[in-house]
């Protein structure tokens, strides 16, 4: 099996160094995902920009977590489920919601369930959602803006989930207590 390099600030390509330094300063560490992505400054830059843009959408912390974790669980990402569990806790998301997402269980509200269902439809149907999928999403109080924002979140997660699958990125120590595997 190929082993992907986990870059440090010192070993990273020049164009990746600033992002790794920023992560080190902000998070106190370089996440393994960033360490792998640093090999390609373009993917690291694209990923961090998508992440920033998705966190600036109309979704609140719970909704961001629903989109992220629904995709992470569906893609069976061994790295992102624990990482986003830790992130959700730091965002003060209800622990019951976090566990329901990790265990692929029903959401606590109809609106969050509609968001989860729509996100799954986008993933599973590769964007070819039905009129019924859209109608249910709109009926729950979401609009066209949120349809596009789900696609933005999916774009971010496809990059991270696929990189982690290909690279077998080790889970960061800080997130090991949230280890996850599909049941």
Image (spheres, helix red, strand yellow):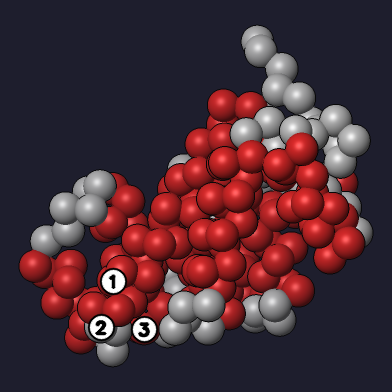
3D distance between C-alphas at marks 3 and 2: 12 Å
Q: Is residue 129 left or right of residue 63?
A: left
In front of the other: 107 or 147: 147
Q: How many residues crowd around disc 2 within 10 Å: few (fewer than 14), some, or many (20 or more)? A: some
- For residue 111, the mark is 3
Mark 3 vs mark 2, foreground winner is 2
The Cα atoms of the two marked residues, 1 and 3, are separated by 14 Å
- In this rendering, is residue 85 above or below 81? below
Q: Earlier in the sequence, mark 3 or mark 2?
A: 3
Few, some or many residues within 10 Å of mark 1 (<14, 14–19, 20+):
some
Q: Secondary structure at mark 1?
A: helix
Which tag, 1 or 3, sits closer to the chain's start?
A: 3
**Is 163 placed left or right of 144 in the picture?**
right
As drawn, the label of residue 147 is: 1
Q: Secondary structure at mark 3?
A: helix
**Spatial CA span between label 1 and label 2:** 7 Å
Q: Residue furthest left?
A: 131
Residue at image position (70%, 66%) is: 87
Task: Quadrant for residue 103, please give it.
Answer: bottom right
């Amino acid at each position: 099996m190929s082993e992907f390099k986990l870059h440090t600030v010192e070993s990273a390509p020049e164009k990746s160094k600033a992002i790794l330094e920023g992560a080190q300063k902000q998070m106190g560490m370089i996440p393994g995902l960033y360490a792998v992505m640093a090999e390609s400054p373009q993917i690291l830059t694209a990923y961090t920009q998508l992440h920033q843009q998705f966190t600036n959408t109309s979704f609140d912390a719970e909704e961001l977590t629903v989109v992220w974790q629904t995709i992470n669980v569906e893609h069976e990402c061994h790295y992102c489920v624990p990482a986003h569990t830790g992130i959700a806790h730091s965002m003060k998301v209800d622990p019951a919601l976090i566990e329901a997402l990790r265990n692929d269980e029903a959401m606590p509200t109809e609106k969050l369930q509609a968001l989860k269902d729509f996100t799954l439809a986008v993933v599973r149907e590769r964007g070819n959602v039905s009129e019924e999928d859209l109608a249910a999403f709109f009926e729950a109080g979401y609009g066209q803006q949120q349809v596009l924002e789900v696609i933005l979140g999916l774009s971010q997660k496809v990059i991270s989930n696929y990189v982690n699958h290909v690279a077998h990125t080790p889970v960061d120590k800080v997130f090991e207590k949230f280890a996850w595997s599909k049941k």
